[in-house]
């Protein structure tokens, strides 16, 4: 799905590994979370664990996407310094480096 495409497109292995570990962490967390109880209002404990996990995954992917865009901006600036016209960089290089939309 979309999140896996985005993770696969991240530029650094450390980022991809961290995201994959975060996504897979639900498999270790969820089996040990109590199923019932409306401790948190009308929501059971497993639901709260899932919501917390989703927030964590989203926070990380937003962070890495921002880092990715900073790297792209730096790369575009570097390419401009080596005398490539800006329109060539923007139209022909950057589209290949963009992340898929989640």
Image (spheres, rainbow, N blue to C red):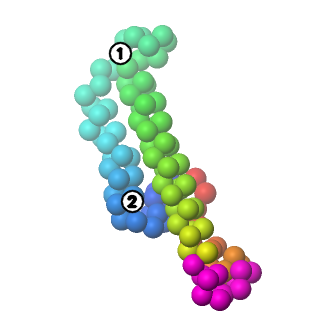
Q: Which residue is mark 2?
A: 16
- Please provide percent x and percent y for residue 30: 31, 32
Is residue 49 one of those drawn in magenta? no
Count of number-bearing discs: 2
Q: What residue span does the magenta drawing correspond to? A: 78-88
**Residue 96 showing in the rendered view:** no
Q: Residue furthest bottom?
A: 83
Q: Position of residue 75 (x, y in %)?
A: 56, 74
Q: Residues within 10 Å of mark 1 (few under 14, many from 20)?
A: few
Instruction: Please provide percent x and percent y for residue 8.
Output: 44, 64
Residue at left offset 36%, top offset 46%: 22
Q: Which mark is residue 85?
A: none
First reached walking from the N terminus: tag 1 or tag 2 = 2
Tell me which residue sits at (74%, 81%) in the image. Answer: 87
Say which mark, if any, is on residue 36: 1
Q: Hey, which quadrant is residue 96 in on the image?
A: bottom right
Disc 1 is placed on an element classified as loop
Main secondary structure of the magenta stretch: helix
């Amino acid at each position: 799905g979309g999140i896996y495409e985005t993770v696969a497109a991240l530029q650094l292995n450390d980022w991809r590994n961290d995201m994959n570990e975060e996504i897979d962490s639900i498999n270790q967390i969820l089996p040990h979370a109590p199923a019932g109880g409306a401790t948190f209002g009308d929501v059971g404990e497993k639901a709260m664990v899932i919501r917390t996990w989703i927030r964590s995954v989203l926070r990380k992917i937003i962070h890495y996407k921002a880092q990715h865009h900073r790297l792209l901006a730096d790369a575009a600036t570097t390419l401009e310094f080596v005398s490539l016209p800006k329109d060539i960089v923007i139209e022909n290089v950057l589209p290949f480096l963009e992340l898929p939309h989640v």
